[in-house]
Image (tube, coloured by chain):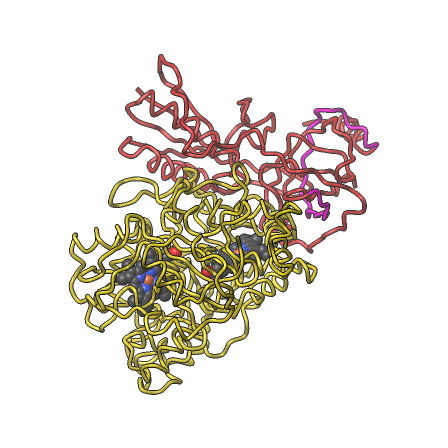
Chain colours: A red, B yellow
Amino acid sequence: MKSAATLLALLAPLSAHAAETGALVRFVSCPVYRDADSGKKSGCWLADDPATGLRWDVSHSPYKPDVGMGVLVEGRVSAEAPTACGAPVLEPVRTSRLDTPCVRHVLPAEGYPGRKFKLPPRNIQPLSVARPVPPGPYSERTFVTYFEFDRDFLVYQYDDFIIDNAVTWLRAAKPKKLIITGYAATQPETVTGRKLAERPQVAQQRADAMAETLSRLLPGLPIETRAKLAAQPTDHPDADGIPGQSQRRAEIRAVF
Amino acid sequence: MPRGRPSSALRRRLLLLGLPAAVLAGAATQSVRVGADAPDRWWSPGEGRVFPATLDYTNDHGTIRTLVVDGPIETKGHPFFEPIGTNGRACVTCHQPADGMSLSARTARERWDATGGKDPLFAAIDGSNCPTLPQGERASHSLLLERGLLRIERPWPVRSFNGKPVKPDFRIEVVRDPNGCNSGPGRGPEAGNISVYRRPRPVANLKYLLAVGFPFDPKQGYALPLDPDDGKPQSGNLMADNRAGNLRLQMEDAAASHLQLMGKLTPQQIDRIRDFELRIYAAQQESVQGGALDTLGAEGGPVKLRDSQPGALGSIGTPVWSEFAAWDRISPADAARLTPEQLAFRQSVARGARVFRDRTFLIFDSAGINSRMGFGNPVRNSCVFCHNMTQMGNDVAPGQVDLGTTTLPFADPWDDLPLFRVTCLGEPHPHYGRVILTYDPGFALTSGKCADVGKITLQSMRGLAARAPYFSNGLAKDLRAVVDYYERRYNIGYTEQEKQDLVNLMSVL
């Protein structure tokens, strides 16, 4: 248990909007869309942390909010200037849609340009582009995919990229079988005064969703699924240093 | 060279003689649909005509061309053209070359008038609002005659999807049944079926609809499902509700329903139909206002479709509708060879292509885009976001999206269509909530998922000029009405010029 003083110390720089670059920010609120226009997908996603009153630019999330639904924000304070959307930027960041309804808030651009769309680094090539065969030797290896809070839905330009790479390797490595373990962050944590925990079922759902996808991409390869609750954070690089994201995962283990 | 058009009768005779289009240039201008198209505008089943390698028909906007690779084709004995079922229809009945291999509502009316309603097109099974109605009366066929709609009967409840058993996560009740096909003995969800009404989708350029761009269906959140016949990934771009994943499944469905074929298609029939479907291309070739669509650097018409690789995503390769990019920079010398009307029209088409790609607006509450995928709700984008395949304008990923065309509050309030009340039993629908009023649940009738209610597979955008009305339920009576629908759906704020540019673009596809 952290003392009240440490907590205050943690919060203090944030409230001064001078949070240290890299500091972790986590809260629940209602998202705000700012209708900035620098072409396709250039609008801004903002969210106000109810505890500090600070507004953050959360647009860099690989899965973006819905103005009508609550949002769980998890991100790290970035050094990017607040010029694109009018708020300090979280990057890396995740914005999970929660089932709680929100009043829809859409702000005008107010002079902010938003960001011209660039393909995110995790994007896959069309099938017409041959994937280079990854070199051996091949031995037991695990690939990890990540999910939105409490969901089992494959994340576009994130999980598909990870799976595409995994499948290219698996096709070359020809393992005997796959063991897919879905994890759920079922231990409740209090965020913005709200107790958050993933449903236990989502662990198996994640494993099943990945198994369905991999059975289509690697027909005939035997797949076993497992579920693990009370997922703990890991430091796997594809979770981008966001502990909550690293908990919400499925591990695809190739067994020889 | 673009100088107006020869009469279609003359043009057709010349084309049948195998003369290239260039020879036709300079002939007299004619801008209306001409009676001279008769009698061979309509293709009756079993006529035994030869389907020429290139075949042109006029429409309000110009000329549509169908092109058969390695044609001509002998249609005598060909299962696409012969009445192989029990009701006198053939596939060609609803997939007519003059209508871009679909069927316009106007053609349906012309057939009614020409045959007193006796054409097999009006077969009770699905060419009438319901087989239980008095078939001799025009009113019993109003949906086909007014909006080009055929009755599609789907089993209910859905029991399997992609080879796996499913239990629908919604309940469906009939709120209104103006035609009697969703209530009464043996009819309606209670009796194990649902009738919805849909436009025929064009049978041409199919290599594009079958092309697979990426290994995933990001809208469903899985890798693409595999074809039960060859084990390869399926494009997911056939049929409004994606009930058929490949051409064989589609034609078996079509033969059993539309043709009332009692037995099964033979393997030879399946092969011949598939062969024809993969050889036929269709696109607008000439414009009344703009002249030949493949001149001054433009690449309109079906040749380009035939010669291009399908499945390319416009945003990372050749932008969608680049066919008309050259008309953005017509040199003064070339401009001088055009009439002022032609020049203005061509520039408008080129602008229309840019409006289609670059003029953004807020897309909101469209399942498939704004949920469950993580694009956000809303997301700023343009027409090309969904219509993203180079040359074709369908969706490279499986294109099941809820545009609102069949579902309240965005659909037109039509009381001649059945209205269903869908109640989500699990999670509520991400945008409509728990209870949804719809004329056609679309993809949900295939997947069994409430989140898919109202999703309709994006169609080909080719040959639009020949096949009004538009959208799966004929909601848009002409191209302007398509733009008006989007304007209303997404509060776009297009200028009058932008609207006209989009209409002109769509008229030359």
Residue B158 seen: no
Out of A238 and A54, give the one closest to the viewer: A238
B222 vs B18, nearest the viewer:
B18
In this rendering, does residue B141 appear at all?
Answer: yes
The reply, left or right, for residue A81 in relation to residue B28 is: right
What x and y, as percent, mark residue A160? 47, 34
Number of numbered tags placed on the structure image = 0
Residue B137's quadrant in the figure?
Answer: bottom left
Classify residue B450 by image quadrant: bottom left
Q: Nearer the viewer, residue A200 or B145?
A: B145
Which residue lies most toward the top here? A137
Q: Position of residue B308 (x, y in %)?
A: 42, 41
| Quadrant of the image occupied by residue A192 | top right
Q: Residue A37 in magenta?
A: yes
User: Does residue B325 belong to the magenta stretch?
Assistant: no
Percent x, y of residue B5: 49, 62
Vertical placement of residue B143 versus A110, above or below: below
The answer to which of A32 and B307 lies nearer the viewer is: B307
- From the viewer's perspective, is B303 left or right of B329? left
Please report the residue visible at 38 percent of the width from the left and 75 percent of the height from the top. B108
Residue at horizontal 71 percent and vertical 26 percent from the top? A23
Q: Which residues are magenta?
A: A16-38
Furthest residue in direction right, as rendered: A16
Residue found 55% across the figure and 61% down from its top: B432
